[in-house]
Image (tube, grey):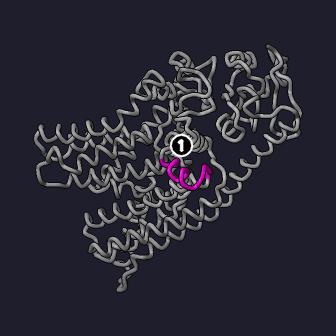
Amino acid sequence: MNRREAILSALGIFAVALVARVYFAAQIVFPKPEDTAYYVAVARNLLDGRGLVFDALWSYGTPPLEVPRAAFEVWLPMPTFLAAIPMAIAGQTFMASQVSSILIGALVPVLAWWLAADVAQELELPVGRARTLAVGAGLTTAVYLPLLLHSSLPDSTMPFTVLALVAIVLMTRILRSTSRPRIVDPRLLALGVVIGLAALTRNEAIWLGVVWAGLVWFTGDRPMADRVGLIGVVAVVAAIVFAPWAVRNWQAFGSPLPSQTATNALSITGLDIFAWNDPPNLQRYLAVGWQALLEMRVVGFLHNLLNVLLLLGLPISILGVISIPLVWPSRSLRPLAWYSLVTFLFTCLVFPVSTTWGTFLHAAGPVHVWLVIGALLLLDAVIARVGQMRGWTRPVAWLGPALAIFGSALFSLVLLGTFGRGSIETRDHYAQLGARMAEAGHPLDETAGPVISDFPIWLADTQGARALALPDEPPVDVFDLARAFPGTRYVVLSEGGDHEHWPEDVDAGAPWSECFRELDIGMAPTRVFEIVCR
């Protein structure tokens, strides 16, 4: 493929991906799930001159426990910085914040095309099949639902996916080089910068560094000095990029790294992230017994495989998983394959509970690209084999990508309405909640004091009130939480269902239930309790 053809192919794929993402994002009118609302709300506070702060305390695992508080005790700031750019130009709306995720998400299919072209060159496919494979990979990822959905949400998924794929392309280029590496090699410096930026986006950037170090150390016959240099330069540059954020975290939270992330590995339920008087710890974790610990890992494995990788990517995702033995030997995809395997297994084994709440989901963008390329390689191989058996004389390599594009586009269009309606319902719910509380004489605004809620991020973002996460603990512990934050007057259960203690304990008259008087706002299933004890 000459330079002109490559540029036109990349631009064409980017244009298709951009149109698909604009159309899809137009249906998503509210930042759902809550982490998306967090990034957007912090961007709004940043543009208002308040800095990187947020008005909800959604977890109690990282001191200081104050509200408003410094943002990003667990998550990382890159999505907020990216969302703030179009918001500064077009206004502080959710629609404006989507611009960054749409543009960044449209780069992913271009990178998929690039990787697929590398694989085709490595396999020495005929020119027609090679072009069809590469363009097919780009166009399939352009309409592939898991990548399409997160391109409409300004969260960490798409920025991390782009940075991870760029890092993987750079790794492949450097490892293929036959010349002795130079310390100031621009590709090495660029890889360090990209991994450093990825570390400002998601904690899984550590696996990009681990994969790079492993491939340098265990593949090839480089002298020891060269291996140390290849690893060391990238590590130093990445550390320099991340260092300012580490200093900020140290000042804000007393640690340069998100220490609460390690604590989350000891969760025994997803609601442990909101614990107040019963936080995760090793003794509590081990007390559940080895059977429960094993079951957690089985559940985490099935969630990562089925919910994250397979269900939203049907039917291509199934072919992608089947193709893993086919694509694993590929040198062009080796860094991507190792990243996918390490990230998948680590979240299953170390964070089996947290991963059911999105740990692997938001780091799986590169894995989806790997599966798409693998699926197209499998289809190409099958069609080529059938053609040989049947004696076909005309090239039909286009058939595999055509099926993949059609299947992915159809599945995305079918489920688009579901995601759109969900965002509209959540937006309308919080608009109605604010109106009903105001009508009842209990407005949820800055005068309400901190409000305890099962969805504190959405409540703070939509109502302009300070919010506290509702722990899944008995009324006595929730009352203790209210006393720790003077002025707390309300507990708002927007949906309920996941909590074991709320509202069941209050309904059953558990100790200290008398301190929570229910307010009738006529908005079932939402329930609001006023704290009447002082």
Question: In the image, is residue 85 part of the stretch drawn in magenta?
Answer: yes
Q: Is residue 311 visible?
A: no
- Residue 295 horizontal/vertical position (percent): 55, 32
Q: In front here: 488 or 33?
A: 488
| Residue 242 belongs to the span the image colors magenta | no
Q: Quadrant of the N terminus?
A: bottom left
What is the number of callouts on the image?
1
Residue at the spot 88% in from the left edge and 39% down from the top edge: 522
Front-lying residue, 487 or 143:
487
Tell me: residue 289, above or below residue 316: above
**Where is the C terminus found, in terms of image quarters?**
top right
Residue 171, x across and y down, in percent? 27, 50
Q: Give the dominant element type of the magenta stretch: helix, strand or loop.
A: helix
Above or below 175: residue 39: above
Q: Which residues are magenta?
A: 82-94
> Quadrant of residue 343 in the image?
top left
Residue holding disc 1: 302
Is 37 drawn above or below residue 456 in the view shown? below
**Residue 45: x, y in percent?**
58, 39
* Left or right: 218, with 167 as reference point: left
| Quarter holding residue 477 | top right
Q: Secondary structure at mark 1?
A: helix
The quadrant where residue 410 appears: bottom right
